[in-house]
Amino acid sequence: MDVKDAGGEGLCLSGAQKLEVPVQWYAVVIVEIAKAYEKGGAACLSVLTDQKYFQGGFENLEKIRNSGVKCPLLCKEFVIDAWQIYYARTKGADAILLIAAVLPDLDIKYMTKICKLLGLTPLVEVHDEREMDRVLGIDGIELIGINNRNLETFKVDISNTKNLLQGERGRIIRERGIIVVGESGLFTPADIAYVQEAGVKAINAIHTSFWKISMVMVEEC
């Protein structure tokens, strides 16, 4: 399934945070929460596969895919090597995160081509004007994620999204039909409305609140 078309204008990428649960529960919890997200209307699920933060790593993708979840899966990983893209695909990923802050332009170009050959959709994440300009200079980019977290101060400011979508950058994005994904700091309907008005067509990283709710549900079972 093509991630870009998964939800039309209402595409919503639902994410996952570090979850502190007993290891023996983990495989069940992550699958059940994925099913709950899909049932609740999520058009795509963002699955964090970095083993530093999540038990299971890439196997989480496989568990969710084999559980019967049908919506596209985004592999949320610190990708630095092409083998991670191939491996994510074998585990059921439909899309993969490429972070401009850690990848040079040549790697983004190369990995974008690999993704398309494998039928994966690359979501290229930017944090600031410099990164946005770099990514807009690369042909074939269809999804750009704007992360509102400053990597130096870790401060979150959703006005970052609006700033990056103004003027010439916004014009280029609209002309190319690039879908913009809002990331980080989106906790309330007002936050979401703000970035949508700025030009965002999808949202990711609203997961912190979702996970807190999900943990309450797990504890009550």
Image (cartoon, grey):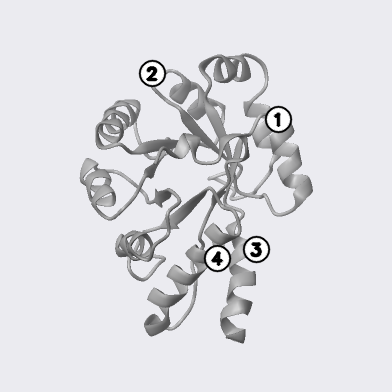
Q: Which residue is mark 3?
A: 209
Give the spatial CA distance, label 3 vs label 4. 14 Å
Q: Earlier in the sequence, mark 4 or mark 2?
A: 4
Q: Earlier in the sequence, mark 1 or mark 2?
A: 2
> Dot 4: few (<14), some (14–19), or many (≥20) neighbours within 10 Å?
some
Q: Earlier in the sequence, mark 1 or mark 4?
A: 4
Percent of width and height locating residue 55: 36, 71
Quadrant for the C terminus, please: bottom right
Q: Secondary structure at mark 1?
A: helix
Q: Residue at x 49, y 29 (%)?
A: 131
Give the spatial CA distance, label 1 vs label 2. 23 Å
Q: Secondary structure at mark 4?
A: helix
Percent of width and height locating residue 32: 48, 71
**Can you tell which of label 1 and label 4 is closer to the viewer?**
4
Q: Quadrant of residue 118?
A: top left
Q: Which mark is residue 198?
A: 1
Give the spatial CA distance, label 1 vs label 3. 23 Å
Q: Residue at x 31, y 61 (%)?
A: 62
Give the spatial CA distance, label 2 vs label 3. 35 Å
Q: Which residue is mark 2?
A: 139
Amino acid type of disc 4? Answer: Ala
Q: Which residue is mark 4?
A: 36
Q: Residue at x 70, y 35 (%)?
A: 196
Q: Are marks 1 and 2 in contact (CB under 8 Å)?
A: no
Amino acid type of disc 3? Answer: Ser
Quadrant for the N terminus, please: top left
> Dot 3: few (<14), some (14–19), or many (≥20) neighbours within 10 Å?
some
Q: Earlier in the sequence, mark 1 or mark 3?
A: 1
